Image (cartoon, rainbow, N blue to C red):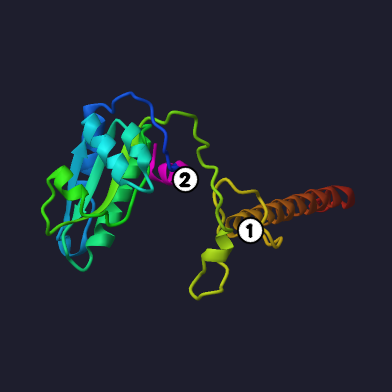
Amino acid sequence: MDVYEAVRTVLAVRKYQETAVPPDVVRRIVEAAWLTASARNVQPWHFIVVENRETLRQLGALARTGPYIAQAPLAIAVAVEDTPFAVSDASRAIQSMILTAWSEGVGSNWVGFLWPAEVKPLLGIPEELNVLAVLPFGYPAQATGQGKKERKPLGEVAHREHFGQPFECRRRDEGSGTKDGAIPLRRSSFVLRRVARSLFQTRAEIAAGLSSAHIEMRKGVGYGDS
C-alpha cells in the first residue's frame, strides 16, 4: 500500500481480534515512529510497547476515552520530554505509527491527550516525562469502510496563493466535472490538446484536398503540355 492510499483509507479502529500482531510488524511500527523527523532533531520521545494482558487491562481502566485498550493485543504509550515542540514532534510520530500499522492491515486509534499521572508508575515512566497518548493496535474485528470519510469539500479548505482563491484541484476518485461546472485544469489541458490535434488534422486534410484538386485542374486544362 503506498503512502497516499494509506492516508486515504485509514480509519479509527476500536474493536480488535485477539490475534497477536507479529513481532516483525510491531518492530516496523516502532521504527516508523523512531524514524520520524523532529524539530532540530531533538527526538523528545519515548515509546513503551505493551503486550502484557494485565497491563493492557489496567491501561483500559485508566483511559476514560479508550477502555477498548483492554481488548487490544498491543498498545504503545508515547511519553514526551518537556520541550517546546515535543507535542507536535510526537504527534507526527504517532501518525507515522498509525499509517504504518494500517499498511500492514493493523488498525489503531489515538487515545487520550496528556494522560493522568497514574499511568506513569504502571509503565515505569520517569516523573519528568509526560504521557501524550496511548495507541492500541490490532487486526480489526469487523470490516472497515476503507476510504469512506465525511470530509468538507476540498474547495472549502484548500486555497491557491491567497485565502479564498479556488485551489482548482480534484481528488483522483472524484467525478469528471466540478461543483460550479468549470473544467478542471488537467481536463482542460487534455481538451485543448484534442482541439489542437483536430485542427492540425483538418488543416492537413484541406491542404491535401487542394493539392489533389490542383493536379486534376492541371490535367484538365493541359498544364505542362508542349
Q: Residue furthest bottom?
A: 162
**Horizontal arrangement in the rendering, residue 30 relative to residue 66 (left or right):** left
In three-dimensional space, the C-alpha distance between marks 2 and 1, rounded to whole angstroms, equals: 26 Å
Q: Estimate the x, y position of residue 131 in percent, counting from the top left.
A: 22, 53
Identify the mark at residue 151; answer none if there is no mark. none
Q: Nearer the viewer, mark 2 or mark 1?
A: 2
Q: Quadrant of residue 98?
A: top left
* Dominant SS type (magenta): helix
Point 27% across, 57% down: residue: 114
Q: Does residue 35 appear in the picture of this structure?
A: no
Point 48% across, 73% down: residue: 161
On-image quarter of the N terminus? top left
Badge 1 marks a residue whose secondary structure is helix
Residue at which label 1 appears: 188
**Horizontal arrangement in the rendering, residue 104 relative to residue 183 (left or right):** left
Q: Residue furthest top?
A: 19
**Horizontal arrangement in the rendering, residue 178 relative to residue 103 (left or right):** right
Point 21% across, 59% down: residue: 38
Q: Which is nearer the eye, 37 or 77?
A: 77
Q: Estimate the x, y position of residue 73 in percent, counting from the top left.
A: 29, 30
**Horizontal arrangement in the rendering, residue 76 relative to residue 175 (left or right):** left
Q: Is residue 24 above or below residue 209?
A: above
Mark 1, other Cα within 10 Å: few <14 / some 14–19 / many ≥20: few
Residue at which label 2 appears: 8
Magenta residues, start to end? 1-9
Q: Estimate the x, y position of residue 133 in percent, counting from the top left.
A: 28, 51
Q: Amino acid at mark 1?
A: Ser
Mark 2, other Cα within 10 Å: few <14 / some 14–19 / many ≥20: few
Q: Amino acid at mark 2?
A: Arg
Q: Which is nearer the eye, 152 or 182?
A: 152
Q: Is residue 83 magenta?
A: no
Badge 2 marks a residue whose secondary structure is helix
